[in-house]
Image (tube, helix red, strand yellow):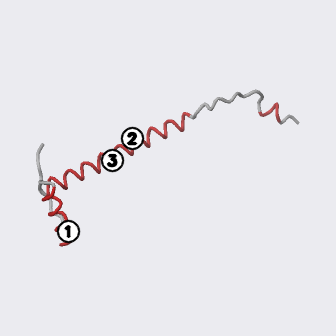
């Protein structure tokens, strides 16, 4: 997979925190950012998939075990 350089602007405070975090994890800033973006994208994809599955279930409906004994017309005859 080819790699591409990008430029981002961060506050000094954020950059210092990022450097410290990368150092504690014994990784590079690039690797740390790439991993976090990948995790964020995976979570978003999982959420969208779960949402699609829930919509399918809701459209299909649920059988709650009830039995329809009379039609609406029979119950409300005039």
Within-10-Å neighbours for mark 2: few <14, some 14–19, many 20+: few
Identify residue for label 3: 43
Front position in the image: 1 or 24: 24
Bin the neighbour count of mark 1 within 10 Å (Cα to Cα): few under 14, some 14-19, many 20 and up: few
Cα distance between the residues tagged 2 and 3: 10 Å
Q: Distance from label 3 to label 1 (Cα)?
A: 24 Å
Q: Earlier in the sequence, mark 2 or mark 3?
A: 3
Q: How many marks?
A: 3
Q: Mark 1 falls on what kind of element? A: loop
Sequence order check: which comes first, mark 3 or mark 1? 1
Quadrant of the image containing the N terminus: top left
Locate residue 77: give its quadrant.
Answer: top right
| Residue with the mark numbered 1 | 10
From the top left corner, tell me how far across and down residue 56 is, in percent.
49, 36
Q: Residue at x 64, y 29 (%)?
A: 65
Give coordinates of residue 69: x percent, y percent. 76, 27
Question: Percent x, y for residue 11?
Answer: 20, 71
Q: Which residue is mark 2?
A: 49
Q: Secondary structure at mark 3?
A: helix
| Residue 28 left/right relative to 10 | left
Vertical side of 16 occupied by 1: above or below: above
Q: Residue at x 77, y 34 (%)?
A: 72
- Going from N to C along the chain, the mark reached first, 2 or 1, is 1
**Which quadrant does the C terminus fall into?**
top right
| Residue 43, image x, y percentages | 33, 47
Q: Which mark is residue 66?
A: none
Q: Using the numbered discs, state the Cα–Cα distance from disc 2 to disc 1 in whole angstroms.
A: 32 Å
**Residue farthest along the front direction in this orientation:** 24
The quarter of the displayed image where residue 16 is located: bottom left
Quick check: marks 3 and 1 in contact, CB under 8 Å? no
């Amino acid at each position: 997979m080819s790699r591409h350089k990008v430029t981002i602007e961060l506050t000094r405070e954020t950059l210092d925190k990022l450097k410290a975090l990368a150092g504690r994890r014994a990784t590079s800033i690039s690797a740390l950012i790439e991993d976090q973006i990948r995790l964020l994208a995976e979570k978003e994809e999982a959420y969208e998939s779960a949402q699609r599955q829930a919509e399918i279930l809701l459209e299909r409906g649920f059988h709650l075990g009830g039995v329809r004994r009379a039609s609406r017309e029979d119950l409300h005859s005039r």
